[in-house]
Image (tube, rainbow, N blue to C red):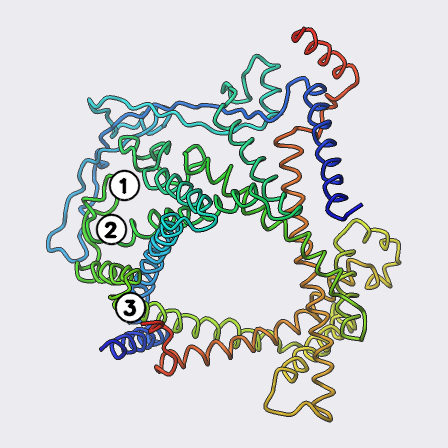
Amino acid sequence: MKSTVPTLIATIVGVVLIVAFFVPATQSWSETAVDWFNILAGVAFILGGGNLIKVQLETISSRRPGWGYALVILVSFAIMLTVGLLKIGVPPAEQYPNHPWSGEYDAPASAFGWIFENVYNPLTSTMFALLAFYVASAAFRAFRAKNIEAMLLLGTAFIVLLGNTAIARLTDGIPDSLSFLRLDQVVANTMSYITTGAFRAITIGIAIGVAATALRVLLGIDRPYLGRT
Amino acid sequence: MSQSRKATIGWLVVFIFGAVGLAWNAFSQPRGFGMRYVTDSTTTYYEVKVSPPIGSIPKKPKDGEGAVAPKDRLVWVSSDSPDLEKSNVTRTSAEPISVTRTSSVPPIAAWAAAENGGKGPTGATYRFSVADTIGVWIAAFFTLAIFSFLWGDNPVYKFAESVVIGVSAAYWMVVAFWSTLVPKLAVPIAPIAMQWAVPGVDEERKVSVVLAVIPAILGVMLLFRLSSKLGWVSSWPLAFVVGTTAAIRLIAHVQADFLAQISNSMVPFVVSTNGRFDWGASLGNVVLVTGLLSVIVYFFFSLEHKGAVGKVARFGVWFLMIAFGAAFAFTVMGRITLLSERLEFLFNDWLWLIDPKGDHTVTTIVSNAAGLLATVF
């Protein structure tokens, strides 16, 4: 029962969705299944939150190194969750001023919106911005034009970077008859033809891989949902 | 001199430079820096009864037996709504409700308004916001805290990192709760009981209770993942999620990434534009198809990459290298854009160092510094 029922569930729901794609009369089955999927995805976030609390509380109670940071995680988690769930500072919706809870939970003037704008957004975007330094540093250390492949990679990266800067304007003087030699045109043609061809092949390969993996799951050959249990 | 000492001195110079810049800004900027302004707008709402227009046709429900005549509706409208003037709209005796909404104002607009008696273009009054001002300083602190990782792992960075973990986990939980669980789970199960959060929702249940409750049961089963003994219970909803994902991905990828990509690659090798041979587009299409086929050959591992196959595969590798080079360049550009946005936040939104109005002059610096000294002594 522990492995048969989950396998049946995965197979049946998968087959139903595929049938619903081809048979218009069963379209609503697909919509229902997708709604349930979204609900379970929502519950998965609660599960993730619960797991976060469990792990951090274990760290704090056993006074492991860095337990103070676990406390910071829990406090920031609790504050954000409370203001978001309780819609603190959210004005009511235009149509329902008599329902204080009717406004959008992420209204900019709300406490949730304030934390998003002044804490979450600066933190995440700065973390991604930080990667600019590490990408540049890694590229400087790793990229060496030792062979044709490396030269093509480096040369293309260099041209595409230059072509998207003001330096590209230096080639505006090239006559119209030779306009394909202008830097912005070189970049556009590289992206339209060479890069598109290569990435299209990768995309087709990924699609074949996804189809094969999905079929293995639907046929019960791969059963990742059984996990550790 | 050791490497770490050199780094310490280097960062010290940077921080001193930053502090001098801050002081310069504080003295030279007549309006200071790091402040936020907002505008409040208060709207009054009246409850009104909307009668159906004379001659309205009775509506027949989809699965009902008899036709139902349109009824009066009670709705709330704002005091400036033209609906109040309509003949079929009458105010009820309910007390009007006033709602104040606050929105941010760019500092430059607030200064311009201050010069015009504090009134903005729409007549709204701009005011200094303590909450938003604290917010911009906190945002600046966290931005610098993350940047401090460039120096090395440090407690300030770890603090910011912990905050981002806690806040982002809660953020996605709240989003899932209000945008998925309430409208898709709670409302179908109890539409009337959920009116407090989602008013105006159709009071009649659209789906049967059984269909509405099944995902709730699966959701509760999913939470058993946290239990070490009953963890196996969660494999049922997980199987549902995996089966659904597999089917959706199978259909989507075969349709959009396999068939559509092949279809889009069926391009003519001879292109004519305005009746003339377009050698640029023709050559481009030849290159596109050649690249596509050669890269596919490279990824075809059932044949040994020797002889003609090996040469075509090598050609495919060249195409891949060009594609990866372009992708790398775009990744770098994306990160640099984010970096410039963060620097723009620090220098413009927080420090107001960017000076489009030309406020930073030697005269203002001297007069502000003199004013400060006079205040202190």
Residue appearing at x 25%, y 27% in the figure: B47
> Looking at this view, is B237 or B92 the one in front?
B237
The residue located at (59%, 16%) in the rendering is B114
The tag on residue B186 is 2
Q: Which quadrant holds the C terminus of chain A?
A: bottom left
The answer to which of B327 and B23 lies nearer the viewer is B23
Q: Name the residue located 19 percent from the left edge and 35 percent from the top edge.
A: B72
Q: Nearer the viewer, mark 3 or mark 2?
A: 2
- The answer to whether marks 1 and 3 sit on the same chain is no
Residue in front for this viewpoint, A112 or B285? A112
The answer to whether dots 3 and 2 both sit on one chain is no
Q: Alpha carbon of mark 1 to alpha carbon of mark 2: how far?
A: 10 Å
Query: Which secondary structure, mark 1?
Result: loop
Residue B197, which numbered label?
1
Say what amino acid the circle numbered 1 marks: Ala
Position of residue B187 in the picture relative to residue A108 (left or right): left
Query: Label 2 amino acid?
Result: Ala
